[in-house]
Amino acid sequence: MTFGWTRATLVLASLIGGLGTAQADRIKNPTAVFSGLDKITGRIVSFEVAVDETVQFGALQVTPRVCFTKPPTETPNTTSFIEVDEPGAEDKAKRVFSGWLFAASPGLHGLEHPVYDIWLVDCKGGTEVIAEPKETPEELPPIQDAAQGSNDPARPGDIMAPAGGTAPRPPAVETAPLRQPAPQRQQPARRPAAPIINSDRP
């Protein structure tokens, strides 16, 4: 009996935890912290970038647009949307990455470049909490009577009677009476065929 109560308590705790996660707020931070790897030299560099500022890392220009963290009471989830450009010929920059980086999963949707790797480490300095909309149960439309009044407007999917009153009856179709099949005559029973014996002996 104790096992049953323990199991029910665990299920209830997981449900409450799931609801709390779905309704979690996030903190908007002014600074993003990254680490970068130069694959040729093997050197790793940590650097901080203010949101909407551009920093040069090797040959790449990194610009974070937002950096979000969760409040301390929630499950950590640090994310940043960044844009990475690589200068090309005639000072024309080529966009090599634009997307979200996740501190908990550096390899997920990360920057793919033959020379450099960049991943998000942290966001800091934020005090502005952005409240995410809470989930509200979806309200179903009220059930209406199936019988629609004559003055009610027609809706898509309604079956409508033709104009001018009741629909005409379909024309009568003449059918021939069914004929009974003729009784079959019984065939006399056949005798089983006798086995054939080879009579070509000398």
Image (spheres, rainbow, N blue to C red):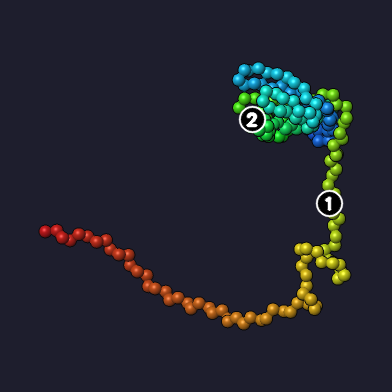
Q: Quadrant of residue 27?
A: top right
Q: Quadrant of residue 104?
A: top right
| Outermost front residue | 90
Q: Residue 44 at x, y = what percent? A: 68, 18
Closer to the chain start, of discs 1 and 2, is: 2
Q: Secondary structure at mark 2?
A: loop
The quadrant of the rendering that contains the N terminus is top right
- Per the model, the C-alpha gap separating discs 1 and 2 is 46 Å
Q: Residue 21 at x, y = what percent? A: 81, 33
Label 1 environment density (alpha carbons within 10 Å; few <14, some 14–19, many ≥20): few
Residue position for label 2: 112
**Front position in the image: 160 or 195:** 160
Residue position for label 1: 140
Name which residue type carries label 2: Glu
- In the image, what residue occupies the spot 43% across and 76% down? 185
**Side of 168 where 148 appears, left or right:** right
Label 2 environment density (alpha carbons within 10 Å; few <14, some 14–19, many ≥20): few
